[in-house]
Image: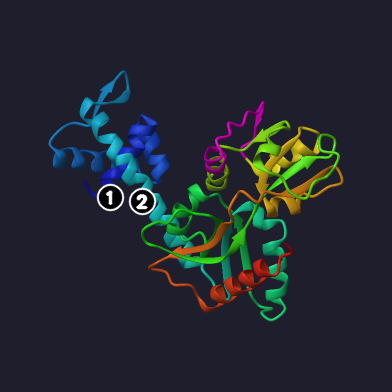
Amino acid sequence: MRIRHIEVFHAIYTTGSVTKAAKKLYVSQPSVSKVLGHAEQQLGFKLFDRIKGRLTPTKEADLLFTEVDQIYHQLINIKAAAENIRNNEVGRISIAATPALGFDVIPSAYVKFTKNHVNINFNIQTIHSSKSLSHLHKHQSDFAVLFSPKSIFGITETVLGYGEMVAVYSKEFVSHEPQSFSLTELLQYPLVSIWDSGPLADLVWHQMQKANLRPKSKVKAQTYYVAVNMVRYGSGICIVDEFTARGQRSAQVGIAKLPEIPKFPIKSLNLDNKPLSNLSSKFIEQLTTELAELPR
């Protein structure tokens, strides 16, 4: 099937009519019918039957659609990537970063960087690790900055620094305000769980298992800032990255170190076939400096 065959077949299959498919593709109905006929001729079987005025997919079409749907969405990604490449401007840095770095690290690095680079435009987006590969391939960002991402073929990664997991506790439950917790001590308090929230949660869970601990929780949060807010309102204690903890510090909560949990790497990621511009490389250097100068 040719690309136009795929577009027309997908449009008819998802809309159920030549008229709606033509509107979706911004072409005439005869043009859609002609392309459909040509596709069926090349394939050697019918794709649709007309039943009560509506085009109904044949069994062959149903079998073909799964593969066509994947290719169709890849075509959309290619078009989006081409659009982003065409609109790319000189003196522009596009960054995708884990949300926690948006509290302090990136804003501070941006202000310092732009003092010496006044004509640079920035596009800063937040992203989670699971979406980073698609984001980079669509050229929606020049590079991503993530916590402990998995190594991926075709992606260049650079370690910018390291972060720590900390305990954020409600002073209502932990009135003596400790500076550090052992994992065993921590589990004596009501716990807001974050076990399904990505690589950092996996790191914490691994250490729990290594210490032969079985944490229990009545409430689970998918995002760290929600977990911290749960604690702020008196839910007990949670384990989050230090950047989220500092960014949401308040009078109602305290922050304690967790010496048993190892530090995690903070990495920049970019496509192997799309080297970083000089400007992007310089801003990454600024981020590295910013992370190195954080209070510990």
- Amino acid at pointer 1: Ile
* Residue linked to disc 2: 75
Label 2: few (<14), some (14–19) or many (≥20) C-alpha neighbours in 10 Å: some
Q: Quadrant of the C terminus?
A: bottom right
Q: Is residue 90 visible?
A: no
Q: Position of residue 284 (x, y in %)?
A: 58, 71
Question: Magenta segment, which residues?
Answer: 206-222
For label 1, the SS is helix
Q: Is residue 144 left or right of residue 178?
A: left
Residue 3, which numbered label?
A: 1
Q: Quadrant of residue 36?
A: top left
Instruction: For mark 2, give the secondary structure.
Output: helix
Q: Between residue 147 and residue 102, name the one nearer to us.
A: 147
Residue at the (33%, 40%) spot, across then down: 69
Q: Residue at x 22, y 32 (%)?
A: 47
Dot 2 amino acid type = Leu
**Sequence-first disc among 2 and 1:** 1
